[in-house]
Image (cartoon, coloured by chain):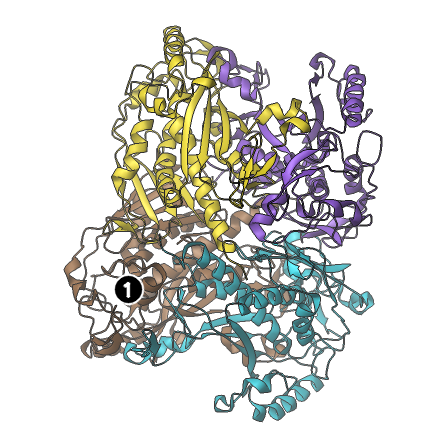
Chain colours: A purple, B yellow, C brown, D cyan
Amino acid sequence: MSGNGIGMLFRLTTFGESHGAALGGVVEGCPAGLPLCEADLQGDLDRRRPGQNRFTTGRREPDQVRILSGVFEGVTTGTPIGLMIENTDQRSRDYSAIQELFRPGHADYVYWRKHGVRDYRGGGRASARETAMRVAGGAVARKLLATVGVRIRGALIAMGEERIDRSGWDWDQVELNPFFSPDAGAVERFAALLDGVRNAGDSVGAMLEVVASGVGVGWGEPVFDRLDADLAKALMSVNAVKGVEIGSGMEMGSGRGSQLADEMFPDGQGGVTFGSNHAGGILGGMSTGQEIVARVALKPTSSIRIPRRTVDVTGQAREVVTEGRHDPCVGIRAVPVVEAMVALTLADHWLRWRSREGWRL
Amino acid sequence: MSGNGIGMLFRLTTFGESHGAALGGVVEGCPAGLPLCEADLQGDLDRRRPGQNRFTTGRREPDQVRILSGVFEGVTTGTPIGLMIENTDQRSRDYSAIQELFRPGHADYVYWRKHGVRDYRGGGRASARETAMRVAGGAVARKLLATVGVRIRGALIAMGEERIDRSGWDWDQVELNPFFSPDAGAVERFAALLDGVRNAGDSVGAMLEVVASGVGVGWGEPVFDRLDADLAKALMSVNAVKGVEIGSGMEMGSGRGSQLADEMFPDGQGGVTFGSNHAGGILGGMSTGQEIVARVALKPTSSIRIPRRTVDVTGQAREVVTEGRHDPCVGIRAVPVVEAMVALTLADHWLRWRSREGWRL
Amino acid sequence: MSGNGIGMLFRLTTFGESHGAALGGVVEGCPAGLPLCEADLQGDLDRRRPGQNRFTTGRREPDQVRILSGVFEGVTTGTPIGLMIENTDQRSRDYSAIQELFRPGHADYVYWRKHGVRDYRGGGRASARETAMRVAGGAVARKLLATVGVRIRGALIAMGEERIDRSGWDWDQVELNPFFSPDAGAVERFAALLDGVRNAGDSVGAMLEVVASGVGVGWGEPVFDRLDADLAKALMSVNAVKGVEIGSGMEMGSGRGSQLADEMFPDGQGGVTFGSNHAGGILGGMSTGQEIVARVALKPTSSIRIPRRTVDVTGQAREVVTEGRHDPCVGIRAVPVVEAMVALTLADHWLRWRSREGWRL
Amino acid sequence: MSGNGIGMLFRLTTFGESHGAALGGVVEGCPAGLPLCEADLQGDLDRRRPGQNRFTTGRREPDQVRILSGVFEGVTTGTPIGLMIENTDQRSRDYSAIQELFRPGHADYVYWRKHGVRDYRGGGRASARETAMRVAGGAVARKLLATVGVRIRGALIAMGEERIDRSGWDWDQVELNPFFSPDAGAVERFAALLDGVRNAGDSVGAMLEVVASGVGVGWGEPVFDRLDADLAKALMSVNAVKGVEIGSGMEMGSGRGSQLADEMFPDGQGGVTFGSNHAGGILGGMSTGQEIVARVALKPTSSIRIPRRTVDVTGQAREVVTEGRHDPCVGIRAVPVVEAMVALTLADHWLRWRSREGWRL
């Protein structure tokens, strides 16, 4: 396959299977002179790391990232930044039971049909483990964007039938609970729901929201490489994501123009302020200067202990039960991943914007 | 700006402003030997054309497409297919009233901030008129895909608070009513809603669904160029689209793995059949062989007669009323557009699939 | 085929066959605010136009270019610039004699083998006529680069066994003779040579040199997208070009490091000056600030009146004589074409440079 | 910088500095099912490795490559192939003397001007050491192409003023002498020349030729992504290359059409044979089925012991002498590198060809 890279000017290319020797990534396009060290990446990786509480998989993945190139004497040199995480916890025997089976809702059937071979160990390239490199690369983008005042934060806003109360939104809460919930009041409900799901051997979906503040006006390139289009691609490319919304999203379909167009006012300093943000900070594919708001829905993982009907590689009807250490809600650990995808997309479009704007002929 | 092209192997590049001399497009990558003539394109263009009934803009845009290259003696030659639609109805005076104003919810403010100049005539490049070339290019993709049995159909499934009854879904109805509704029973409700919206000088959003049947197994390239990620980009790039769903979409976020993973069964002929299609025909970013199902929400157009508060180019507070001939529901005419975007994306991934699969080393 | 576009940020995509309805092009990435009109493009097109003297083909191609989009009130708007030249002199009957034959040294055999169909009229897409759009697009790049002081000039330095005397180089002479010769003393020799070649029904090759001055330091991106690598691609993509040199070029292979490395000296103003320019203004794939110097060799055209042995579409041995109006030396009119390719490449790399350099974190 | 990847469908992305932790590469697009192991790559790496005889640098670089992903149970899985070579011989102190100086003819000056920082240890990213990953990636391409009968071989044909006698060309000789000379008779002359150059503390240029046999008809995509254009880019991107020729190359500029167009004849088996190969196997940017022949000239390395005038980072006039272990003729070890670049380019165009050809609608 190709398609292992994303971005035009700021570009991340990744490789690596769940149970191979290592995960790797290459970050191209980071300008020279940015202070960068492994600790800058490790912070986000640790937020994504499993095994930190009872609500995520029991696998232990230290996910220690190494910077192999592109940094010299503490700053980026402009050359590509090579990243690697060695796989240390490769209990392949966990998966031998399903070597001949296809899990319903899992990619292994299509990998096998597409390629004729497949790495059945832990999902191979289709494993959520692949997202570790997105987080590492996204951390570089995040640090770059911080130099121009851009901040990217994500949160879990729903799990199964439980939703946060948006009136209780507090960004500071996000890092204080195991669900990345911005609403402290929802944490107990999420915990109860998830305990029930796990005990039942089931899994549950989730909804996440990402907000980027500090983005300038005019990032994004109509017609096809719109900022929202590239965000949609970046977010939909994350494992398990099945829906992407910008601003008011799907609700736009049932509203009126007189309610949903964000009115504009002088801000008293020569600029413009908006009366609302239904557009999610993007009009005509370009940033408006408001906060950029995106939401995604992640499906429940297909690796569950409840028996499911399926077929095996010989085409026979079978029943499959996925034992092993799986997250009952993959959406939780996806918060740093969707932040990373937004960071990568914004870094790319910031460079694209710089190439032609911010000056006049 | 760059970003006026979409697709890697099957690629459409477009140009042209709403009130410029012409709209144009270049289709690259169509294999040689495909029978093609202007009538093949005109059919879809006519479905998108305004002025055909009281529910769309009164503008008359004959939208007569010319093939300028790439076809010889009735078949494609493998060279790029140049397309052009001359703009014939350029009543620029309709827009002079808003030359100094920014419409809330419209891209003209960000164009002006991004570039320092803007073509204020009818939205320029940001006009929905730009989508005509998507439809023309998509028609080539559609005809190419038909040679391998792929069929792409779209429908309007909701407008404002009105929804179709999915039990009444009949594809044959779609072309028989002005709303592309697959449910004949909803037509009267849509008509009443839209008459009310138009009389109020307002606009209304809509939801569309697109279904592709006949797609083989394994189209799409993990990790970043997933079929669903590329569909999300293609669909989100359409004017006014603010949300994209694949299969069960946003509802996945509230479900259980035991309900939402599509079980698999032997089909009795050596193949596989699925018990449901929550995945929308895509797993791990690759097609499963089921129908591919995508949904989009389009916001109500920002060009309305109800007064809205805004600013002008000097930063002063103003009120804007958009007179002129605007669709009260841009979602209706977007049906052929979203079909085209799906066709373009599938054609590209079919060629990508062909490059490496369908044979064995 | 794909591959009809060149450039990442400043990008030209072209379409059109020699005897089709029109040639077209799309220029993406030109920043907004550049004054541009059709006359800016027509100047270079006229330099390339045939039929202006006895040394080029007698075909009359007015090559009147139209700008269809991207320019409003005399300046570029940042949107893609659509270009079109209608084909007016389509004497298809000139070519009917060779409809069944493949010309040795011409692309029609491989087109036919690759695609199974071919447009046999005048070479179709393989005609040198395709280069008109390169010149038109290159003129936009040239005007953009002029805003930062870059100037691109080309000249013919050899034809067959005749060479210019470099000591007589005078750029002002280039536009004063029909050969683009910078050496007035060589004009008579070129004329005599070419008259002999034409009378013999033969054709002759040529060598061209292009020089770009005013390029800043550091344009070009190692490792693969080096400035010289992209220039080599751009120049080798021109019809009939079979060799590309940068600076001292092929002679570098026989020299010594002590002679060929360009020494550096303080320029007395805080900068650097070089003692020579064997590198042709490019080191490590990046511009040094010196003049960029490239050379190409063009083969003699394969369309000649001297009989040649070949095969026909049924595989039978035949003899072919190409009557009609062909340039005996295609290298002459290629001067504006190679200038255009250098301009397109530099404009792209200037934007790439701007995206990350010219500022500090 | 971006630009660290080459190829559209078969793509190599590299990272790593001469004296960093490691060199790395990602090979995307290799079809599944190709038998592959590290020994397949090591063979070509060993041919490029320094320190094997007195004619190359005395540095010891074991260049042991590891495959980190994309191969399972001995065959490729279709996922990206991650490659790594750890740097083991990092004698940074060798370079401390030139930390403040720019070597004439070397890229360090432009790196410093472009980025404001530079990794002065051994040339950093500009070191010839970067080419090791090209060789590793090229070895994958080579093995893939072998499945359809393509073979790629390179040779040194000139060094300084010494040239091989083409009548003595014997491919078997190439691996039997330290110069990759196909002419056994030239080896002694090359040795004498190089001993003299090294003793003088100087360096010398070289010319290489690469031949690909077994390539089908019609690989390559006009207009801009011609096979010869992409080969020119790939070859010119190799360190020190300053000129690229296809077939008769620069000599085409002085010839006649009646001599240089390769005549065609029936081959008696329904196909075609050519009377000569001045075109180097490429017409109109597409392969003809003949051998593809390319030639490059490499400049002498700028790292020499003869004193050269230069400036330092403060702009002061200085003299520089490059001590340390440098190849007196970098062209020798470049043979496997240019083979790799041809292999990468052909693998990419073979996949591009497969995507649309080799079948009929």
SS class of the residue under badge 1? helix
Which residue in the structure is indicated by mark 1?
Answer: C176
Chain under numbered label 1: C
Amino acid tagged 1: Leu
Most foreground residue, C130 or A31: C130
Figure check: A151 above or below D141:
above
- Residue at 79 percent across and 48 percent down: it is A93
- Residue at 51 percent across and 88 percent down: it is D169
Residue C77 in view (yes/no): no
Q: Residue C303, percent across and down?
A: 25, 70
Image quadrant holding the C terminus of chain B, namely bottom right
Q: Is residue C61 left or right of residue A142?
A: left
Q: Is residue A260 left or right of residue A319?
A: left
Q: Is residue A316 left or right of residue C160?
A: right
Figure check: D113 above or below D103:
above
Q: Residue D20, percent across and down?
A: 76, 59
As drawn, the residue found furthest toward the front would be B268
Q: Residue C79, percent across and down?
A: 42, 37
